[in-house]
């Protein structure tokens, strides 16, 4: 009888271990639910942008790029096709994704380059749209203050600029801050800083003339931007630690020898 009781205790302890690790795996997979196909990414972006997880697909993915465990998406709103943005996804150990951050804004140009620092702040994310026939583009490090030209015109001082050839009419790419610094050459001391968020862009013809304003859409109202992030479904690591401690306590109670 005592031997059967010991076997039962061991089986019960193993069952507790299997249950705990299965539950941890379930929580982890639930946190990374996206297959990574275009449809699932579009719906995830739509849900985060609108604030509703039940929203229908209302964004169009233009380009994607993978960077280690991160997938970055360049997208366009379907209901307002002059609103563009970037979305960031992380790949889990189950080879599926979860969305973490997004940013978007209206861009009053029919051809443009959209630039922002990556989440790690060590690279610049660059999206190009409708650039067929354009010779090159500039990524500009700007000041943080607007300088007034007139009552209706303002600009930011350009501190440094790196020029790149246009290889495709639509693209998404990344450059490191060191690559920007090498390309720009006369970058001010201390720049580009990982914490510096101010970047813009310009389009150039083969003679080096800035032709950005030729593509301006005066009817598009700019001046606003939106961004957001999505945390884990659960605070994963504290929950894992709690479950492991709870499991250890339960197993200890199961295997504890009765007092003589």
Image (cartoon, helix red, strand yellow):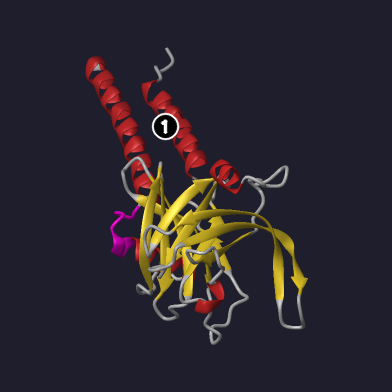
- Residue at disc 1, secondary structure: helix
Query: Is residue 35 covered in magenta?
Result: yes
Left or right side of 118 for 258 = left
- Give percent across and percent down for residue 149: 76, 76
> Viewer-proximal residue, 254 or 120?
120
When the figure is inspected, residue 197 is found, relative to residue 194, above or below; the finding is: below
**One can see residue 41 in this view:** yes
- Which residue position is annotated with label 1? 247
Residue at left offset 47%, top offset 64%: 206
Residue 75 falls in image quadrant:
bottom left
Left or right, 152 with respect to 127, comes to: right
Q: Position of residue 29 (x, y in %)?
A: 34, 47
Q: Residue at x 47, y 43 (%)?
A: 236
Judge whether residue 234 can be spotted in this image: no
* Most frequent secondary structure within the magenta stretch: loop
Q: Which residues are magenta?
A: 33-40
| Nearest the eye: 5 or 40 | 40
Above/below status of 6 relative to 75: above
Q: Quadrant of the C terminus?
A: top left
């Amino acid at each position: 009888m005592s031997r059967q009781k010991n076997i039962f205790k061991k089986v019960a302890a193993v069952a507790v271990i299997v249950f705990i690790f299965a539950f941890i795996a379930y929580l982890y997979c639930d946190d990374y639910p996206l297959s990574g196909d275009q449809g699932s990414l579009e719906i995830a972006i739509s849900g985060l942008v609108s604030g509703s997880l039940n929203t229908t697909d209302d964004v169009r993915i233009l380009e994607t790029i993978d960077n280690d465990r991160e997938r970055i998406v360049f997208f366009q709103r379907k209901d307002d096709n002059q609103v563009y943005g970037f979305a960031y996804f992380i790949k889990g150990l189950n080879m599926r994704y979860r969305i973490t951050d997004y940013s978007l804004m209206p861009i009053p140009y029919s051809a443009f380059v959209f630039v922002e620092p990556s989440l790690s702040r060590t690279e610049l994310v660059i999206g190009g749209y409708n650039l067929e026939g354009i010779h090159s583009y500039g990524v500009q490090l700007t000041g943080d203050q607007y300088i007034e030209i007139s009552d209706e015109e303002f600009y930011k001082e350009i501190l440094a600029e790196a020029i790149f050839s246009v290889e495709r009419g639509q693209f998404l790419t990344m450059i490191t801050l060191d690559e920007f610094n090498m390309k720009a050459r006369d970058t001010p001391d201390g720049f580009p800083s990982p914490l510096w968020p101010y970047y813009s862009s310009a389009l150039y013809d083969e003679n080096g003339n800035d032709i950005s304003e030729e593509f301006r859409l005066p009817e598009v109202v700019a001046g606003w931007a939106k961004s957001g992030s999505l945390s884990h479904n659960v605070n994963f690591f504290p929950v894992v630690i709690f479950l492991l401690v709870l499991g250890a306590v339960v197993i200890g109670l199961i295997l504890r020898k009765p007092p003589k």
